[in-house]
Image (cartoon, rainbow, N blue to C red):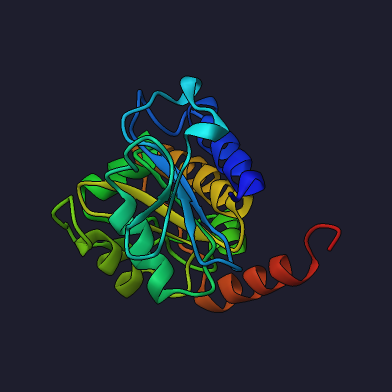
Amino acid sequence: MLENLKKTICEMNRELPNRRLVSWTSGNVSGRDPETNYAVVKPSGVTFEDLTPEQMVVVDLNGNKVEGGLKPSVDSPTHLYIYRHRPDVHAVVHTHSNYATSFAALGEPIPAVLTAIADEFGGPIPCGPYCQIGEEEIGQAVVEHIGNSIAILLQSHGVFTIGPTPIAALKAAVMVEDVAKTVYLAMLRGKPLEIPPEEVARGHRRYVEKYGQG
């Protein structure tokens, strides 16, 4: 079942190491099917280069396995909590990408000091609190602290991005790491200048309304 979504989620997971967002088996991409409300998640502990669409695991939003021979990712409770509480979200990406996670290690948001941050995220990329790994606490923190952003850092943990499609959530994860690297490098030289909130809002609105061919 959900063969097209399985293929897409497999491809998006395989992109994570290609984009240098993860190491070994850490990190994952999931997607939610709007018709069945089932989610397709990465199997636990399988290296990205070995992933196939057939290995993807289908679960309901309560974590019950619907289809698949392997165990789902240990991060599944986080993804499923987000899906249950954000019906607009159809994909979740989790990474420990280095530059972005360096901000998470300090419990700091990534400030809106670049037009790319204003355009893509509409403001600073927030940092939520530290949470124990394993159950739904991380998902709760994402939902409570992400606000209108499409990305959030969690203290001492990593990055979560959301989107209406898997490719949109993956793009957000790529952009988080890209802007985090630039801000990190700027901070080595001095104090980056924050863009005024009204200009951030204007830039984001223009990006959403006019960028691309849609």
Q: Which of 194 and 176 is in front in this view?
A: 176
Residue 140 in which image quadrant: bottom left
Task: Decide if residue 184 is on the left or right side of residue 198.
Answer: left
- Picture coordinates of residue 195 (x, y %)? 52, 66
Q: Is residue 9 above or below residue 86?
A: above
In the image, residue 3 lies at what x, y percent?
63, 44
Whether residue 15 is visible, yes or no, is no
Q: Is residue 36 visible?
A: yes
Residue at 37 percent of width and 26 percent of height: 46
Task: Please say if 144 is above or below 158.
Answer: below
> Is 29 or 205 nearer to us in this picture?
29
Number of marks in picture: 0
The x, y position of residue 169, in whole percent, is 55, 53
Q: Nearer the viewer, residue 117 or 64?
A: 64
Asked if residue 11 lies left or right of residue 94, the reply is right
Q: Residue at x 47, y 67 (%)?
A: 149
Task: Please tell me which residue lies in front, 49 or 207.
Answer: 49
Where, quadrant-wise, is the C terminus in this rendering? bottom right
Residue farthest along the left direction in this orientation: 132
In this picture, residue 171 sits left or right of residue 38: right
| Farthest residue, direction right | 213
In the current view of this chain or complex, which residue is farthest to the bottom?
Answer: 198
Q: Where is residue 41 in the image (x, y as percent from the top left)?
A: 44, 46
Q: Which residue is drawn at 34% across and 43% down?
A: 72
